[in-house]
Amino acid sequence: MTSRFRQLLDAITHTGPSYQPEPLPRRGDQFEQWLKARRDECARSSEQWQALDGLLDTYRLHADTGTPLDEHTCESGTPDDCYACYETAAKEQL
């Protein structure tokens, strides 16, 4: 009974030997290299280059701050200084 309870607790709390967290973005990883290669294939002044460069900047920011890709991250480093964070918090209070 204890082992079944322990397995359930591990599943709920995302701990234990079988838990594999999603990998965090890292500078220089395969995905960053892929984004950079796709960006470099485009003409520098094109809309595609600008869009891919923006995605690359966002990915690097997530990598630098250690933030998962599905979470918001702020260039200022603190959510208190981020307009998007402020707006999201205000909407949640309504």
Image (cartoon, rainbow, N blue to C red):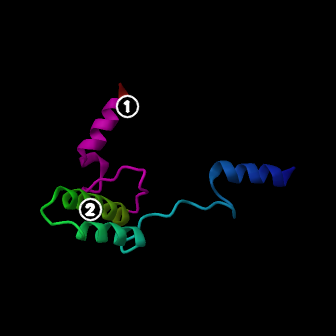
Is there CB contact under 8 Å for labels 1 and 2? no
Q: Secondary structure at mark 1?
A: helix
Residue 87 screen position, x and y as percent: 28, 36
Tell me the magenta residue range: 66-91
Q: Earlier in the sequence, mark 1 or mark 2?
A: 2
Q: Nearer the viewer, mark 1 or mark 2?
A: 2
Percent coordinates x, y for residue 80 in the rendering: 28, 46
Residue assigned mark 1? 92
At x 42% / y 65%, what residue is drawn? 25
Q: Does 73 sit above or below residue 33? A: above
Question: In terms of image quadrants, where is residue 53?
Answer: bottom left
79, 48: nearer the viewer: 48
Residue 75, percent from left and from top: 25, 56
Residue 78 place in picture, x, y as percent: 30, 53
Q: Using the rendered view, name the quadrant where residue 63 is placed.
A: bottom left
The amino acid beneath tag 1 is: Glu
Label 1 to label 2: alpha-carbon separation: 28 Å
